[in-house]
């Protein structure tokens, strides 16, 4: 049981992060998916802020601000714009139905918790128990990328996975060095632009954003 | 002496819960009317309906068996018992060792089973249809409810509701992420079990999508009054269970009778807000297709299980 209030708050935010990851899996509409992604970014920024405050690590303030600007404002805005330009608001199709996906999700969470528990016992930071949650949300985002057919939800899954990784980094090691963090942030931003261009090319070639068309090797 | 006090308090609480349950229903309906820009029927309307029904003659179908006649009384008794073992104002309840949270779920299940059997007893199409739907909803809601109770039990190391409340209300302030999950799951179960809007519409009497109303379609007179009253008690009991588990601040501890007025003062705004919140939720959401109900309750179960896992990971 973490004794400090900040530890408890971070645990609560970690739980919220996992909840949002689950909500993303159940969500059928792309617009709500983007909103959830922005919310996850906000939770991440808040938790980073609390870690920064409670441990006195100055550079974590920067990464919290970076998260806020990039993941709560910039990336959702780009996604909204892409959605408007591509005119995609339709319901997301999944490969397996949503209740079974949720069950797979629970199994993944249990797996992640078990996997992380020996590492957590060794770690000495105040946030050691959140490592399992971070791992679980990474796995859940993986799951989302696997079960979704359309391009945009897959990309949102990818971005959410990065959120989980970032949370793992702050929770287990109090954040990465500033250079690495800046590099990753830039990578994500540039990746997003490239994805945007890809979306247009995929749609021009196949008249749809369904990635199953790309599995065909020959034109028939 | 304290046992005598306890028993008198127990009787008072059981009586109050039964008598005030229609008032809570009236408050929810009144809030809903306000939110929909209607003037509403007033807080006392459920009492008027009950009085009207008690004065009417009960009409029974020719092929109704004793089960059909006994069910309203059994259901009313079950709900009264359930209302008696939930700590509402104080945790000192002499009757509460009779049933812990698992037995509480069992009492609700017993009442539900009798109602479903009675609905099928007459043999009309609507009765069977309503009973089948009710059983589908409840077999999905029950494990979620149990998981919610287990989460609270794990925190307090007891399945007795008074002990759980004692632990949660009078220990030092700790944020439990697991209880947050359990709270959302409990809300979803509450909506499903009490036939509220996203799952069932309590205001409808003739609609192909109805569940609870389809089951009690054949009841009339005093039988219908008892069934309706039992439903009101069930709603109030669920709300007070929710308050006891997730907002227990202010509930008087064992032997603190002087804290009772304070507990009452804390309970009243909680109940008012709970009713308002329920009405708001019902106004904002539309009734979902019946095939989406398993998904809704599956999510509730998932949240409850997640709460349980969170407890093991974060709080142990």
Image (cartoon, grey):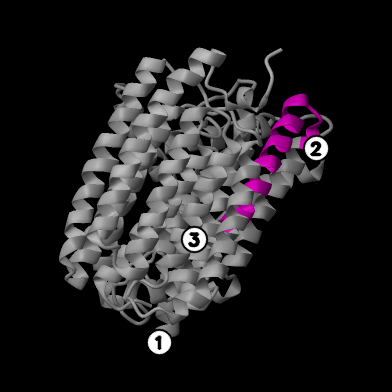
Residue A76 percent coordinates (x, y): 31, 33
Q: Main secondary structure of the magenta part?
A: helix
Q: Is residue A108 above or below residue A7?
A: above
Q: Are marks 2 and 3 in contact (CB under 8 Å)?
A: no
The mark nearer the N terminus, 1 or 3, is 1
- Kindly report the distance in space between the C-alpha atoms of the residues bearing marks 1 and 2: 48 Å
- Kindly report the distance in space between the C-alpha atoms of the residues bearing marks 2 and 3: 40 Å
Q: Is residue A87 above or below residue A60?
A: above
Residue position marked by numbered label 2 in the rendering = B121
For image coordinates 54% across by 42% down, the residue present is A144
| Residue at the far bottom in the pictured view | B1
Confirm whether the magenta stretch covers residue B143.
yes
Residue position marked by numbered label 1 in the rendering = B1
2 or 3: mark nearer the eye: 3
For image coordinates 65% across by 36% down, the residue present is A97
| Left or right, A184 with reference to B113 | left
User: Quick one: SS at disc 3?
Assistant: helix
């Amino acid at each position: 049981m973490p004794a400090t209030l900040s530890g408890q708050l971070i645990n609560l935010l970690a739980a919220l992060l996992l909840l949002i990851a689950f909500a993303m899996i159940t969500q059928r509409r792309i617009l709500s998916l983007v909103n959830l992604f922005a919310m996850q970014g906000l939770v991440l920024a808040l938790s980073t802020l609390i870690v920064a405050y409670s441990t006195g690590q100055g550079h974590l303030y920067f990464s919290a601000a970076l998260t806020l600007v990039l993941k709560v404002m910039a990336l959702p805005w780009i996604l909204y714009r892409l959605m408007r330009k591509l005119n995609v608001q339709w319901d997301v199709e999944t490969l397996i139905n949503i209740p079974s996906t949720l069950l797979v999700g629970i199994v993944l969470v249990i797996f992640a918790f078990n996997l992380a528990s020996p590492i957590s016992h060794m770690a000495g930071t105040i946030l050691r128990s959140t490592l399992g949650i971070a791992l679980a949300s990474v796995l859940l985002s993986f799951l989302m990328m696997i079960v979704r057919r359309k391009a945009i939800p897959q990309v949102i899954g990818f971005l959410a996975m990065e959120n989980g990784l970032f949370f793992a980094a702050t929770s287990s090691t109090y954040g990465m060095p500033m250079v690495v963090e800046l590099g990753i942030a830039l990578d994500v931003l540039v990746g997003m632009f490239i994805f945007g261009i890809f979306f247009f090319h995929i749609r021009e070639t196949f008249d749809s954003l369904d990635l199953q068309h790309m599995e065909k090797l020959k034109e028939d | 002496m304290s046992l005598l006090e306890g028993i008198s308090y127990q009787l008072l609480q059981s009586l109050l819960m039964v008598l005030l349950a229609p008032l809570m229903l009236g408050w929810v309906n009144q809030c809903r009317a306000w939110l929909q820009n209607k003037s509403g029927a007033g807080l006392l309307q459920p009492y008027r309906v009950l009085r009207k029904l008690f004065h009417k003659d009960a009409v029974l179908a020719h092929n109704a068996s004793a089960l059909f006649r006994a069910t309203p009384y059994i259901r009313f008794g079950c709900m009264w018992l359930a209302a008696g073992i939930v700590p509402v104002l104080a945790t000192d309840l002499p009757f509460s060792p009779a049933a812990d949270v698992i037995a509480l779920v069992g009492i609700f299940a017993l009442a539900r089973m009798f109602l479903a059997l009675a609905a099928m007893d007459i043999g009309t199409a609507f009765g069977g249809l309503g009973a089948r739907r009710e059983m589908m909803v409840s077999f999905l809601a029950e494990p979620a409810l149990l998981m919610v109770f287990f989460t609270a039990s794990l925190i307090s190391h007891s399945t007795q509701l008074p002990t759980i409340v004692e632990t949660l209300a009078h220990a030092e302030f700790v944020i439990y992420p697991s209880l947050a999950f359990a709270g959302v799951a409990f809300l979803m179960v509450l909506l499903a079990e009490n036939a509220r809007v996203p799952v069932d519409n309590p205001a409808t009497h003739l609609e192909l999508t109805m569940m609870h109303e389809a089951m009690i379609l054949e009841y009339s007179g005093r039988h219908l009054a008892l069934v309706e009253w039992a439903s009101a008690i069930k709603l109030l009991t669920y709300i007070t269970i929710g308050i006891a588990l997730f907002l227990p601040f202010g509930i008087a501890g064992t032997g603190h009778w002087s804290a009772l007025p304070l507990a009452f003062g804390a309970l009243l705004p909680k109940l008012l807000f709970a009713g308002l919140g329920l009405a708001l939720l019902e106004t904002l959401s539309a009734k979902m297709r019946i095939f989406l109900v398993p998904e809704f309750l599956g999510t509730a179960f998932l949240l409850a299980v997640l709460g349980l896992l969170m407890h093991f990971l974060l709080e142990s």
